[in-house]
Amino acid sequence: AAGVIQSPRHLIKEKRETATLKCYPIPRHDTVYWYQQGPGQDPQFLISFYEKMQSDKGSIPDRFSAQQFSDYHSELNMSSLELGDSALYFCASSSSRGGAAGELFFGEGSRLTVL
Amino acid sequence: AQSVAQPEDQVNVAEGNPLTVKCTYSVSGNPYLFWYVQYPNRGLQFLLKYITGDNLVKGSYGFEAEFNKSQTSFHLKKPSALVSDSALYFCAVRGGFKTIFGAGTRLFVKA
């Protein structure tokens, strides 16, 4: 079965550079979530989109932005990168047909290293 | 606001013994509770969830969880642990379009 696809899997950037992460949800999933996981930490919710509209917002820095496109893929744009942005970034998707109790399906993550 | 707490950073258990990973929750309204597992450098994988109904929920890989409303707990259990169960386990609560995770509990199963 198709899973959530994230690219790139690894990314190395310098401070103050920009980075873009992409996420392709499971087909027919209408909701996409972005999480940031630092070393040894739990995933922190950044932002979510339902049917291409932002549905909820968490601890996403102002330097970051995201959107969901007409084909339901999503991109997380990060600017003015800081050392502290180094983390694993996960995308997850779910189907609203599961109602409010739909579980999340995670991608394998994009590891961002800021030097 | 929704939140979950995992009081143990680490749980050690011998292979073949039963295991329990603890989770307590705080929600307003009906709780939608989940357990996820994460292996090194991998994404989280869904194990099981509680929505309503039977308090004992069965999930993947022989895991189960017991919902206890009076104690606001949702402990993860398995009757007989395997070495391959060693991983990071996250309890989570769903509220709207946001799923909030606990701090995680690292499970070590020793052969």
Image (cartoon, helix red, strand yellow):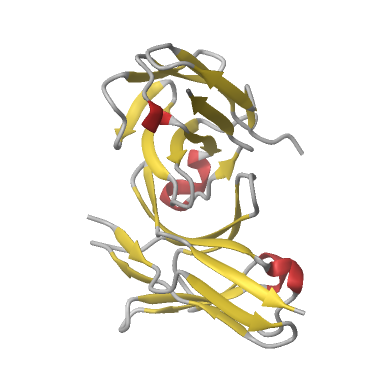
Q: Residue furthest bottom?
A: B17
In this rendering, would B44 be left or right of A41? Answer: right
User: Image quarter for residue A16?
Assistant: top left
Q: Quadrant of the C terminus of chain B?
A: bottom right
User: Image quarter for residue B79?
Assistant: bottom right
User: Image quarter for residue B39?
Assistant: bottom right
Q: Is residue B19 visible?
A: yes
Task: Kindly identify the residue that appears in the image at 64 percent across and 33 percent down.
Answer: A4
Nearest to the observer: residue A87 or residue B21? A87
Q: Is residue A22 visible?
A: no
Task: Kindly identify the residue that appears in the image at 77 percent across and 39 percent down.
Answer: A1
List x then y, in percent, for residue A11: 58, 22
Instruction: Establish if B23 lies above or below A80.
Output: below
List x then y, in percent, for residue A101: 45, 53
Nearest to the observer: residue B41 or residue A94? B41
Q: Quadrant of the N terminus of chain B?
A: bottom left
List x then y, in percent, for residue B87: 63, 62
List x then y, in percent, for residue A62: 26, 22
Task: Kindly identify the residue that appears in the image at 36 percent across and 44 percent down.
Answer: B98
